[in-house]
């Protein structure tokens, strides 16, 4: 046998041996699978890992802005839900898709420390409920993500909230500010532009009495709010209704509730030119924008009606100095009326129609320019009451309040006379 033939024979035997080994391994593998049965499918993790950005050295890019949730656990929020978050030093607030929430550290400690650590205070949350179990679960995961050693970081103008394990749980985008200017609201009055009658048409109004209280009308009842407004941000920590809802239909009650709920979540405001006049725009934490138009009234409207007192607005405050208005209704049976001329107010008190008169100082004009009112005294006319009739507490309270009045405003179907302590007397036409 030649060397060439011998070499070819050796190569064939080696190839056959390798083929035998491969065949044996294949048979063993098939036998193993057959014996072991079907193998379990690997679990697919629904959470998308997100690389955490480098921590920021300051909280300034975070504070004061409204942040809109872009993703939760790597996934976009449920369709048609709008989740928000705002931090401002010791305060934080937002909307979880079902309810508004908010709170503050009484010590003044910031919610977000300079190293990004989040320390939530005890906070309040509304109880409106959630439309579906899935949205309820999302709301719970949303708030839980900011607890237990969570951290805040900013990258590419996005706010990332990392959970205790260092995973990115929430990603937010910064809400762009409204166009226009955040002008001073005190003394301005507005009517809601409600072309689709979501809130009951053009019946909804608001008058900003001072820097902390406002009052207005809805399609059903009157309301008052405590508010703060500064640099385009607006918050409404208190709301109160006035009057009976009995005359209101179910649709009117629903529309009123819708407005109070939406407007109560106000977050940002601005005044800009639109449609040939100024417009007040209020954007809420729920993603809605309410538009108001000016509601001017000629100054002499105060003289064109006989007015009936329907409620007192009083100033309340707590230990922190926060103020809010409190409503006290005045019933028809109290029969407190007022008719104005430039030098006096005259009217009746009670069913017995006791007459009273209020005058300015030294017979000077009682109603002056720029909607000012100055009252020196308010007295019940002698022998005007029936025998044995005394002045009721609310009637006396009204007489006592008159010398403290400072200015008035007629808006829509209401006359509001503002007192020196920040309260007000609210009238409607007889």
Image (cartoon, rainbow, N blue to C red):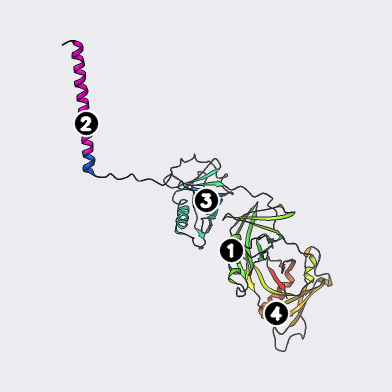
Q: Which residue is mark 3?
A: 111
**Is disc 2 surrounded by few (<14), some (14 to 19) or many (20+) residues within 10 Å?**
few
Q: For the residue labelled by badge 1, is the local secondary structure a helix, a strand or a loop?
A: helix
Q: Of 414 and 247, which appears nearest the observer?
A: 247
Report the number of numbered marks.
4
Question: In the shown orientation, is residue 47 left or right of residue 272?
Answer: left
Residue 55 x, y percent position in the rendering = 50, 41
* Residue 258: image tag: 1
* Residue 335: image tag: 4
* Residue 23: image tag: 2
From the viewer's perspective, is the residue at label 1 or at label 3 nearer? 1
Magenta span of residues = 2-30
Q: For the residue labelled by badge 2, is the local secondary structure a helix, a strand or a loop?
A: helix
Comes first in the chain, label 2 or label 4: 2
Between the residue at mark 1 and the residue at mark 4, the CA separation in whole angstroms equals: 32 Å
From the viewer's perspective, is the residue at label 4 or at label 3 nearer? 4
**Which of the 4 image quarters holds residue 16?**
top left
Relative to residue 359, is residue 146 depicted above or below?
above
């Amino acid at each position: 046998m030649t060397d060439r033939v011998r070499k070819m024979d050796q190569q064939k035997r080696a190839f056959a041996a390798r083929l035998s080994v491969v065949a044996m391994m294949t048979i063993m593998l098939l036998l193993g699978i057959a014996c072991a049965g079907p193998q379990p499918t690997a679990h697919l993790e629904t959470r998308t890992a997100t690389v955490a950005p480098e921590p920021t050295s300051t909280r300034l890019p975070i504070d004061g802005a409204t942040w809109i949730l872009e993703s939760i656990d790597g996934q976009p929020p449920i369709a048609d839900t709008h989740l928000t978050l705002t931090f401002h030093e010791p305060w934080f607030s937002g909307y979880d898709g079902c309810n508004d929430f908010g709170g503050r550290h009484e010590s003044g400690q910031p919610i977000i420390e300079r190293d990004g650590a989040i320390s939530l205070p005890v906070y309040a949350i509304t109880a409106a409920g959630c439309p579906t179990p899935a949205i309820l679960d999302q709301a719970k995961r949303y708030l839980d993500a900011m607890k237990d050693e969570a951290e805040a970081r900013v990258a590419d103008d996005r706010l990332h909230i990392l959970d205790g394990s260092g995973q990115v749980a929430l990603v937010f985008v910064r809400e762009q500010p409204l166009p226009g200017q955040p002008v001073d609201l005190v003394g301005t009055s507005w009517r809601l532009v409600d072309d689709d009658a979501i809130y009951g048409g053009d019946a909804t109004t608001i008058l900003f009495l001072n820097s902390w209280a406002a009052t207005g009308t809805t399609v059903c009842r009157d309301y008052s709010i405590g508010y703060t407004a500064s640099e385009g941000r607006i918050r409404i920590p208190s709301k109160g209704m006035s009057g009976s809802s009995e005359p209101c239909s179910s649709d009117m009650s629903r529309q009123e509730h819708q407005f109070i709920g939406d407007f109560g979540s106000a977050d940002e405001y601005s005044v800009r030119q639109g449609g040939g006049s100024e417009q007040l725009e209020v954007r809420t934490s729920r993603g809605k924008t309410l538009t108001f138009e000016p509601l001017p009234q000629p100054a002499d409207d105060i003289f064109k009606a006989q007015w009936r007192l329907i409620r007192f607005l009083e100033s309340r405050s707590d230990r922190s100095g926060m103020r809010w208005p409190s409503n006290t209704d005045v019933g028809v049976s109290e029969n407190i009326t007022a008719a104005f001329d430039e030098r006096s107010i005259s009217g009746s008190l009670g069913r017995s129609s006791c007459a009273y008169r209020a005058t300015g100082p030294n017979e000077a004009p009682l109603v002056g320019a720029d909607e000012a009112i100055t009252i020196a005294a308010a007295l019940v006319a002698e022998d005007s009451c029936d025998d044995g009739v005394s002045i009721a507490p609310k009637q006396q309270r009204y007489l006592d309040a008159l010398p403290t009045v400072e200015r008035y405003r007629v808006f829509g179907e209401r006359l509001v006379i503002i007192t020196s302590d920040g309260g007000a007397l609210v009238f409607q036409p007889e």
